Image (cartoon, coloured by chain):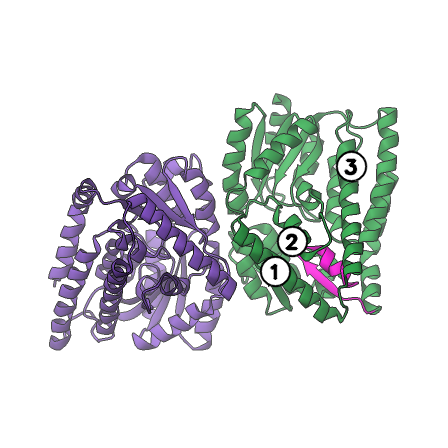
Chain colours: A green, B purple
């Protein structure tokens, strides 16, 4: 029961490196990025390419641990290791890498990474108040200046409008995908959707849009025919799972669950909320709203989780923390308390990229899914 | 070879709880605080009392781990546990607790703590640029409003001037203490100085000033007589060591070292830089300069360490990280590289509040001190 659109996704991913280097040869600049907070509209409007960076593999962690503490989040260590080992094509293609002050691990890692690659750090404030928003708007303006300077292309109003419409189109398609996942049986596996989010950071946006359009048609067909996946319906919430890091979703679907939603940077935090207007301020405002645990008082996230549980008819929530990620880990307590109050089953998992805890996690997830 | 001033310090500390509650009964408000970034001038100018909060004991960690992750800095867990157990007199005396967005562990812990005690969080931005300074100035203004409202006392220009002069006086005395520690032999043990810094957060400022004045006279006598402590001269740099957490200094001085300086929040970051003027902005600027690893690009700290090594004629540097403190841990790499380049011996220690690693640390520190 393979989806053609997912086969196309894998094909596009396989060819992405070649395509990216070709685009680069044609004179387009490449901006690497770590995080869903980077407003890709700005980059696209200058005819440049935003691309996510590798950070989902265990292999590059040992080389990173020569410089970084061992007890640091695997995503941060893996990213740093990829750059140090020069083994990530997206890193190597990047003319400049955009970092942000989301978590302190990344913030301080960037200080070491900038010896290896030109970097630009965006200041995302801790708070969500008006003064913090003003800082963030300025940061997006600074990014615009940087991108214009780096590419030599002026970001005109027209170009910006085009880019905003395009990324909003992408968001609309992800919303549609989520609409379709409300159905029972779920028309698509969580693992396929995870790959879609992971590769959306890496692929050319036009390709991602094309794949999503195909996928939605296919899923509509499935829904009509009542085809899909039964099983306990799981919402994942927490840290991002970047390409290579599929362990938890694989395990959930091995033991009889089906992931129907992801409150994650590889999930709703990637696409929710449209840019409502065509100014830099409008763009900044949309990104500022992303409910990441790195922000002080992030209660919108809890509301989102509760809403998603209802909308997607979820049986249980898997709270996923990358080891040593303090923000998501501590916020987990608030989320757990809030869900328990509503009688929503939740299990909290903290793990890294190693395979050593796979069996143990499988046992825990199996018990959770049997119980709910 | 006991110092009378240190005996007085211990005496004052023993009576502090009683004194604080008496001051409270007289109608003075108490503002609890975690961090050297809180501008105590504002609190003093309203005839209120700034007081540091407990967080240096292992005993309160288990109760904290009911809510907080185990792999979180012991200082954060211990503080939270003290409040939860209601076992810290300074916490219990506090009418309001001032937090700040220094590290993400604290930032997110505050979200849980505020269910137990009224809190006010100051937004310390990640960056050191002008826009961030503007935010910080506003935060100090907001603190002034809060303190005025809470105490019912107007912070007049005159009151503020008085408070600034007083805290500057305290800073001047700590500078003098550091001047005296340049001597060989060192006229005072590191453990005594550590206690002085720890209790400076807790005692009435007038008492601390009195003790420091006495101490300086005593130390001047010692220097004249050539009395003091020989041994390898050690600079400690890194995380704060709040009251109760003396392990590393004890160990260094057990194995033949003498701590002659602390680049720490219980050290230079507590007193360096005067407030230069009497406005809120002048006060904000002084605190904004504190070179904590929580800030992005904190190279002033490295320069300070190199300067202190020279000024205090240091033989070796002990880099101290509280377990899971990402910012100081990662910045340690930059500090280590910078010191090695200058041929300054450095050892990096990461530990928590348990006693289980005492012997292992002792062996490492002994080897380091023999080697330098």
The stretch drawn in magenta includes residue A30: yes
Query: In this orientation, which residue lies closer to the viewer: A320 or A332?
Result: A332
Give B59 or B216, whichever is nearer the viewer. Answer: B216
Expressed as whole percent of the image width and height from the top left, the position of residue B364 reads 36, 61
Nearest-to-viewer mark from 3 and 2: 2
Q: Earlier in the sequence, mark 1 or mark 2?
A: 1
The reply to whether label 1 and label 2 mark residues of one chain is yes
Instruction: Identify the mark at residue A284; answer none if there is no mark.
Output: 2
Instruction: Report the chain holding disc 1.
Output: A
Span shown in magenta: A27-48
Mark 3 sits on what residue? A177
Q: Are marks 3 and 1 in contact (CB under 8 Å)?
A: no
Question: Label 3 crowding class (10 Å Cα cut-off): few <14, some 14-19, many 20+?
Answer: many
Point out residue B174 in the picture as x, y percentages from the top left corner.
25, 66
Residue A139 — which label? 1
- Choose top left, top right, bottom left or bottom right for residue B8: bottom left
User: Which quarter of the image is occupied by the N terminus of chain B?
Assistant: bottom left
Disc 3 element: helix
Mark 1 to mark 2: distance in Å? 8 Å
Q: Residue at x 40, y 65 (%)?
A: B285
Left or right placement of residue A307 versus residue A327 in this view: right
| Element type where label 2 sits in the image | helix
For mark 2, does the 10 Å Cα neighbourhood hold few (<14), some (14 to 19), or many (20 or more) residues? many
Side (left or right) of B66 relative to A30: left
């Amino acid at each position: 029961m393979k989806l053609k659109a997912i086969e196309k996704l894998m094909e596009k991913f396989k060819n992405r490196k070649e395509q990216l280097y070709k685009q680069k040869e044609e004179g387009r600049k490449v901006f690497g990025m770590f995080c869903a907070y980077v407003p890709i509209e700005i980059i696209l409007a200058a005819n440049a390419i935003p691309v996510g960076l590798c950070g989902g593999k265990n292999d590059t962690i040992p080389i990173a641990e020569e410089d970084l503490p061992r007890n640091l989040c695997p995503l941060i260590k893996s990213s740093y290791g990829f750059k140090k080992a020069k083994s990530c094509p997206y890193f190597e293609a990047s003319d400049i890498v955009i970092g942000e002050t989301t978590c302190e691990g990344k913030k301080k890692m960037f200080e070491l990474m900038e010896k290896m690659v030109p970097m630009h750090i965006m200041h995302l404030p801790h708070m969500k108040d008006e003064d913090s928003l003003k800082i963030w708007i300025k940061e997006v303006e600074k990014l615009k200046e940087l991108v214009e300077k780096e590419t030599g292309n002026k970001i005109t109003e027209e170009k910006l409008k085009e880019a905003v419409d395009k990324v909003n189109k992408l968001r609309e398609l992800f919303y549609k995908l989520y609409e379709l996942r409300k159905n029972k049986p779920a028309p698509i596996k969580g693992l396929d959707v995870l790959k879609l989010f992971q590769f959306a950071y890496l692929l050319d946006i036009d390709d991602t849009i094309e794949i999503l359009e195909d996928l939605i048609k296919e899923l509509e067909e499935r829904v009509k025919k009542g085809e899909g996946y039964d099983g306990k319906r799981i919402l994942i919430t927490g840290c991002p799972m970047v390409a290579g890091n599929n362990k938890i979703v694989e395990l959930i679907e091995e033991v009889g669950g089906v992931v129907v939603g992801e409150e994650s940077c590889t999930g709703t935090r990637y696409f929710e909320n449209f840019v409502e207007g065509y100014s830099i301020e409008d763009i900044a405002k949309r990104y500022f709203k992303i409910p990441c645990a790195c922000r002080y008082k992030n209660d919108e996230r809890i509301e989102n989780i509760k809403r998603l549980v209802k909308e997607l008819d979820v049986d249980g929530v898997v709270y996923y923390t990358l080891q040593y990620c303090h923000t998501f880990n501590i916020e987990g307590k608030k989320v757990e308390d809030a869900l328990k109050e509503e009688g929503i089953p939740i299990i909290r998992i903290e793990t890294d990229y190693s395979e050593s805890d796979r069996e143990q996690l499988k046992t825990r997830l199996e018990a959770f899914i049997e119980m709910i």
